[in-house]
Image (cartoon, grey):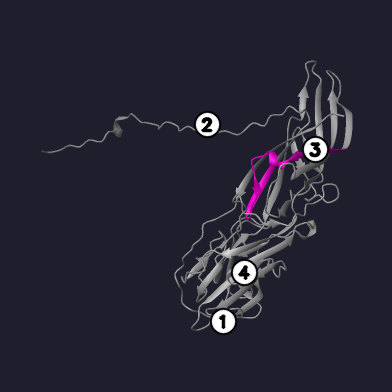
């Protein structure tokens, strides 16, 4: 059986944005509303928090210890009025003489979060593909006295009146892109060989699937009005990862990733019946020989002898190729980061990926030489 080769290249995107750390105090108004946005891509639509989703929120007034002014209430989108708003089912009003602090998280009612006023903790099992969660937490809003006018949160689409609610991702996201290598060759005797590959599955093997993370408030002493980020945990290498509990998915019985069925690679490109999936994983440091990507596919080989018609030479099913992800340049899947792996399937085994370079130049200025282009200064001195 012909040996198939898999080449991998990747790019890691650290999804982070700048934050307005200090926002001028605003006047007190009536019902408390929210203006959510994400720092990075979610399953739905970039930095725009989808109006079909909800999130949970806490609020407490100055001087309180354990009790909450708003205790784990659901916030949802409401477009019934003249102006769309984000609000709780029970309407809460701004206190007359006390500023309010806020913390929110997503998804609503996520059982794996423990909320404190200066610390939040997560525990989660990422092992169940059917329960993949894009877990997010918002920066703490400190000493708010009223709704914002929408200028505090800029998501490129909406400006809601309400409490600025900036979400960050607590997990990591993995995506894969399939690329065809050399899918056709021409021999010296003019015999042409071409391949057609149908990918039936892509899985991540040997990944940590459960663990925990604790985030502390980055500034517990400031009394300033504004937004205070949480400090993510780091390992000994400085990577922002969770503490795994040692649980690793079994490559044989419990591989992780959504199905890439009916993804076809041919000489003319690639066709795809399913949208390329994404997977939320436990943020983790990659260990040599452990985290791997595994591709299963079917392949058909067609031969066209010189002067004859093309015919199907061989047909193989269930072909498997595996590659070690730690052989690449990404040392860890970190919190709030999306990593894209480009998987290149090459039947010939001789494909060498060619980097993309640029050759910049600037066109010369067009000049005119006609007499009307001269400007005369007739000076009467």
Name the mark on residue 324: none
Question: Which residue is disc 4 drawn over?
Answer: 104
Q: SS class of the residue under badge 1? A: loop
Residue segment shown in magenta: 318-341
Q: Is residue 55 visible?
A: no
Rendering coords of residue 267 (x, y %)? 76, 32
Name the mark on residue 321: 3
- Check disc 2: other Cα within 10 Å, few if <14, some if 14-19, many if 20+: few
Question: Which residue is disc 1 drawn over?
Answer: 93
Q: Nearer the viewer, residue 295 or 153?
A: 295
Dividing the picture into quadrants, the one containing residue 113 is bottom right
Question: Please, is residue 5 above or below residue 274 in the view?
Answer: above
Q: Earlier in the sequence, mark 1 or mark 3?
A: 1
Dividing the picture into quadrants, the one containing residue 292 is top right
Report the residue that reaches farthest toward the top.
Answer: 189
Q: Are marks 1 and 2 in contact (CB under 8 Å)?
A: no
Rendering coords of residue 269 (x, y %)? 73, 36
Of circles 1 and 3, the one toward us is: 3
Rendering coords of residue 368 (x, y %)? 35, 31
Rendering coords of residue 141 (x, y %)? 54, 70
Question: Which residue is disc 2 drawn over?
Answer: 359
């Amino acid at each position: 059986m012909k040996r198939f080769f898999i080449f991998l290249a990747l790019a890691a995107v650290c999804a982070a944005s700048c934050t307005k750390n200090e926002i001028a105090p605003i006047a007190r108004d009536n019902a408390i509303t929210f203006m959510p946005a994400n720092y990075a891509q979610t399953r739905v639509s970039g930095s725009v928090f989808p109006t079909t989703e909800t999130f949970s929120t806490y609020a407490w007034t100055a001087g309180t210890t354990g009790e909450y002014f708003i205790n784990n209430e659901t916030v949802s989108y409401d477009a019934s009025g003249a102006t769309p708003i984000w609000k709780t089912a029970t309407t809460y009003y701004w206190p007359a003489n006390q500023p309010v602090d806020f913390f929110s998280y997503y998804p609503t009612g996520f059982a794996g979060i423990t909320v404190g006023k200066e610390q939040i903790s997560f525990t989660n099992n990422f092992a169940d593909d059917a329960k993949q969660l894009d877990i997010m937490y918002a920066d703490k809003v400190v000493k708010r006295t009223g709704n914002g006018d929408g200028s505090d949160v800029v998501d490129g689409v909406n400006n809601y009146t309400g409490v600025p609610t900036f979400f960050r991702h607590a997990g990591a996201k993995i995506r894969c892109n399939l690329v065809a290598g050399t899918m056709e060759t021409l021999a010296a005797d003019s015999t042409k060989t071409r391949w057609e590959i149908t990918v039936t599955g892509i899985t991540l093997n040997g990944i940590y699937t459960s663990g925990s993370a604790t985030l502390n408030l980055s500034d517990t002493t400031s009394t300033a009005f504004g937004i205070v980020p949480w400090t993510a945990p780091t390992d000994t290498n400085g990577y922002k990862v969770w503490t795994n509990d040692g649980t690793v998915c079994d490559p044989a019985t419990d591989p992780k990733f959504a199905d890439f069925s009916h993804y076809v690679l041919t000489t003319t490109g690639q066709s795809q019946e399913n949208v390329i999936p994404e997977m939320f994983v436990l943020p983790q440091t990659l260990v040599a020989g452990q985290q791997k990507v595994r591709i299963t596919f079917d392949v058909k080989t067609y031969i066209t002898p010189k002067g004859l018609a093309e015919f199907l030479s061989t047909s193989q099913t269930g072909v498997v190729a595996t590659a070690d992800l730690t052989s690449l340049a990404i040392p860890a899947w970190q919190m709030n980061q999306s990593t894209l792996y480009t998987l290149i399937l090459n039947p010939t085994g001789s494909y060498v990926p060619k980097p993309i370079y640029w050759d910049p130049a600037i066109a010369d200025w067009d000049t005119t030489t006609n007499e009307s282009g001269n400007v005369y200064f007739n000076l009467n001195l």
